Amino acid sequence: MSQYPILETILSPADLRKIPLEKLPQVCNEIRDYIIDTLAGIGGHFASNLGAIELTVALHYVLETPEDKLIWDVGHQTYPHKILTGRREELKTVRKFNGLSGFPKREESEYDLYNTGHAGTSISQVLGEACARDLLGLNHKVVGVIGDASIATGMSLEAMNHGGHIRPNSLVLLNDNYMSISKNVGSISNYLNALISSQIYHTWKKYSFRFLQWIPLIGPALMSFAHKAEKSFKHFMMPGGLFEDLGFSYIGPVDGHDVIGLVKILKKSLQLEGPVILHAITQKGKGYSPAEKDPIKYHGVTPFNRTDGAMAPSDSTKIGFSKIVGNVLMDLTKKNQNISVITPAMIEGSGLKEYSEKFPKNLFDVGIAEQHAVAFAGALASGGSIPFLCIYSTFLTRGMDQLVEDVSLMNLPVRIVIDRAGVVGADGETHQGLSDLGYLLGLPNMSVLAPSKGQDIIDGLCFMEKFESGPIAIRFPKDSIPIQDCNFTQPNSIEVGKFRKLSDGSDIGILSIGSILSVSMATKQLLEDAGKSVKLIDLFWLRPLDLNALEEELSGVKSFVILDESYVDMGASGYLLNHFQPKTLQKFLKTYALPPEPILHGERVQILKHYNLDPATITKSILSF
Ligand SMILES: Cc1ncc(C[n+]2csc(CCOP(=O)(O)OP(=O)(O)O)c2C)c(N)n1
């Protein structure tokens, strides 16, 4: 007998809708087992998916997807959705090269409306879809799903501000599990918690259920009256209801794991006029006790033991670059309490867990709020603190305007610590860190360091603490080095603008930018094997740069290339070439970088090879000139 007897009959949501309502809990159980079994073998986003199973089943059961539009926020919680939309078997390939994306992807399925990955986009997309439907005179339903952390993003608040004003028929299901990746923070999170815990509200909840049950009987003519009555009741019971005041009908909180209850409340909610927020309470990691107990650890998993949840321990002889950052910032803060560290909801990923425990006053987790994080860091600098903004390359893009207007133009000494720069691997196209150099190197006043090894990060951060003359960014990939190679106690001093010559030669020069150094070194070796003499230069300091010295070095080679782990037009080569003299430019052959197209997911090495950035292909290309 199959382990997934019902699930195997579901090849699309249409099959799900043929299943009797009372069997839906079993569907959910099978999906849960399937996800646990599959991810135990391959890893992936885990706890959020387990929490979103019932709501996903209920949504596909009630909606006529794909005609009705179902829109996801972030999209790391869409494994149940992928399973129900014909991708059950392929889930075994999720996040692998040539396998399913870990996020919704339009190219993958007609049920994936948007390629998502960054938080806070769904309410804007719900409103856009609903307005397009109304303009075209169509009548399908439009529903979005958003988490309690993502609903507090600037984008979501902007969208609600607009949505409550234009009020198209639409529904936003708020999937509230109290958690971001870490524990959710901020006043909106507090507000949601108060909604859930307040006794008054539980009374209202009972009442609202009864109220909604009347709706089919009272008919359309009474709907608007009923809506007003509902609203005034809520105002009486819960004065100043945030969502109501913003123009959304608020329903909830409801149990987000009661799939039958969800189906019923969804059907009724979808009959309401205007935009509706349905607030469902879920548990991250639901149904798998190690993940329920430690949802932070199980947010994303490596392969684990199904029985006890144990994951392979990380190599204790190595230290990750993010952890290096955390350690250096702790050392610096011990000596200087003026330091502040800002993270937009990425304490764990940015290596700041221990820092947050040891220096809670100096650490600001601002939530998923990159725009605010950048401007806030600028003001911390202006006010006399020494701010280190720790942020992933992919998320810094959201704070781009603030980086220009609120930091760079005013020359405020914000220290920007950019993690996950370069090819990110399994997260794929929405998370690639391939554009930061392109804008950082063009901004007024900005200094830029691109470490090629872990010690550079230690040296760089210590240097940056004392660097008062303007904003400065350091960018590095997700990587690790042997702990014994780290010198935390006596960092090397850094000279502004200096590059490193790693080998001398007269045939070919390689200008290597930061994280791609290992590829550059292997390429050098292959070129030398082919009889060429190679000058390899590691451009750790990118801006300002000692251009005279660099051009002097390049005068000694016949030709040179640039290797850069960025989009080719958003990396360092444009900046370098724009500043070289014509006689240097004559020697330039090519920039080896990522093409300006969405870059696939997979292991970094596979991705580099796929885009012809492996040493053998680069060498062949250089020799062909
Ligand atoms: C703009 C942006 N910043 C940061 C992240 C990293 N991130 C991925 S999931 C997540 C937490 C999302 O929490 P929530 O919206 O409550 O959804 P849940 O995982 O709890 O379902 C964060 C911060 C992101 N995806 N996008």
Image (spheres, helix red, strand yellow):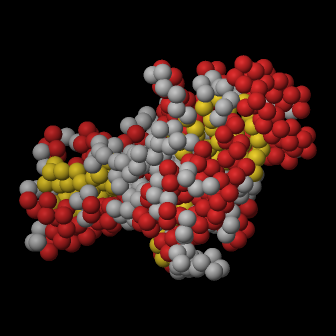
The answer, for residue 415, to whether it is visible in the render is no
Q: Residue at x 61, y 27 (%)?
A: 169
426 relative to 445, above or below:
below
Quadrant in the rendering for residue 611: bottom left
Where residue 378 appears, x then y in whole percent?
A: 60, 37
In the picture provided, is 186 more to the left or to the right than 373?
A: right
In the picture provided, is 382 more to the left or to the right than 360?
A: left
442 relative to 17, above or below:
above
- Give 218 or 563, whichever is nearer the viewer: 218
The answer, for residue 74, to whether it is visible in the render is yes
How many discs mark residues in the rendered view? Answer: 0
- Give 338 or 117, whichever is nearer the viewer: 117
- Give 494 or 171, whichever is nearer the viewer: 171
161 relative to 456, above or below:
above
Q: Residue at x 60, y 53 (%)?
A: 57
Q: Quadrant of the N terminus?
A: bottom right
- Give 7 or 614, whichever is nearer the viewer: 7
Where residue 432 appears, x then y in whole percent?
A: 41, 52
Quadrant in the rendering for residue 90: bottom left
Q: Residue at x 81, y 40 (%)?
A: 209
Where residue 583 appears, x then y in whole percent?
A: 13, 43
Q: Quadrant of the C terminus?
A: bottom left
Where residue 194 appears, x then y in whole percent?
A: 83, 43
In the picture provided, is 435 more to the left or to the right than 329?
A: left
Q: Residue at x 34, y 43 (%)?
A: 570
